[in-house]
Image (spheres, rainbow, N blue to C red):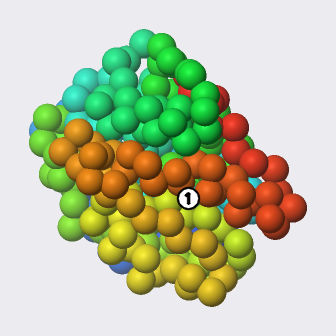
Amino acid sequence: MSVKIDPTWYEVLRPQFEAPYFAELKQFLVAERSQYTCYPPGGKIFAAFDRTPFDRVKVVILGQDPYHEPGQAMGLCFSVPQGVAMPPSLVNIVREINTDLGTDIAPTSGDLSGWADQGVLLLNATLTVRAHQAGSHQHHGWEQFTDAAIEALNERRTGLVFLLWGSYAIAKRKLIDATRHHVLTAPHPSPLSAYRGFFGCRHFSQANALLEAQGQAAIDWTRIG
């Protein structure tokens, strides 16, 4: 497996890469890629860890699976490359940003690399997926790997802001010490649930207020595309 990952994260996650379960995960992925198209491309699997170094993480957004249609997955949750249509969940995220912050952005691209560069870790629980089959790479070891990443942030950092959207992400709050970090929860931004409380959650302004209270720079959430 080609691993492109920031050195700070590699040191943190080295025990995971060397663990027996990860060897089994690699065997599974080799077999999958020999039979099926899988996303994201190999060099992008660890993009979240490569784009946002461990010691620069300020905000964590947790997703579930990479996008499973051609050209969408780029290793950052909710993000799609330039030139790819914005998925409905991301459209709803932009809508909430505009409502929350009083902005009027209408990005032509759904590339969230600008967030990652500011310290927003865009982490899916499962880092790969078989084309056209959502959830197809769940329960093969990725969750153990990404849980270890969350646990490392929880234990070695303080004052992080975790944005947990939807029941799957909210279940990860058990890994987070709320006396050391800030945890904001809301329904998922998908069209099926956004009207149940994602719209109006004001997570973007709240996250910035929490960062600024600690003397840190706010995130420019309008840096999309």
103 left or right of 141 in image: right
Residue 190 visible in the shown view? yes
Q: Is residue 95 above or below residue 164?
A: above
Residue at 14 percent of width and 35 percent of height = 132
In the rendered picture of this protein, how many numbered marks are placed on residues? Answer: 1
Residue at 27 percent of width and 66 percent of height = 167
Residue nearer the viewer, 156 or 161 = 161
User: Residue 124's spot in the image, x, y percent?
Assistant: 39, 54
Residue 74 visible in the shown view? no
Residue under circle 1?
60
Q: Quadrant of the C terminus?
A: top right
86 left or right of 208 in image: left
Neighbour tally class for label 1: few under 14, some 14-19, many 20 plus, Cα within 10 Å: many
Q: Is residue 79 above or below residue 85?
A: below
What kind of residue is marked 1? Val
User: Residue 182's spot in the image, x, y percent?
Assistant: 60, 72
User: Residue 5's spot in the image, x, y percent?
Assistant: 59, 50
Residue at 37 percent of width and 51 percent of height = 198
37 left or right of 90 in image: left
User: Residue 174's spot in the image, x, y percent?
Assistant: 41, 83
Tell me the quarter of the picture where residue 197 sits.
bottom left
47 left or right of 28 in image: right
Circle 1 SS class: strand
Residue nearer the viewer, 10 or 112 = 112
Residue at 71 percent of width and 76 percent of height = 158
Q: Is residue 173 above or below residue 36?
A: below
Q: Is residue 132 above or below residue 156?
A: above
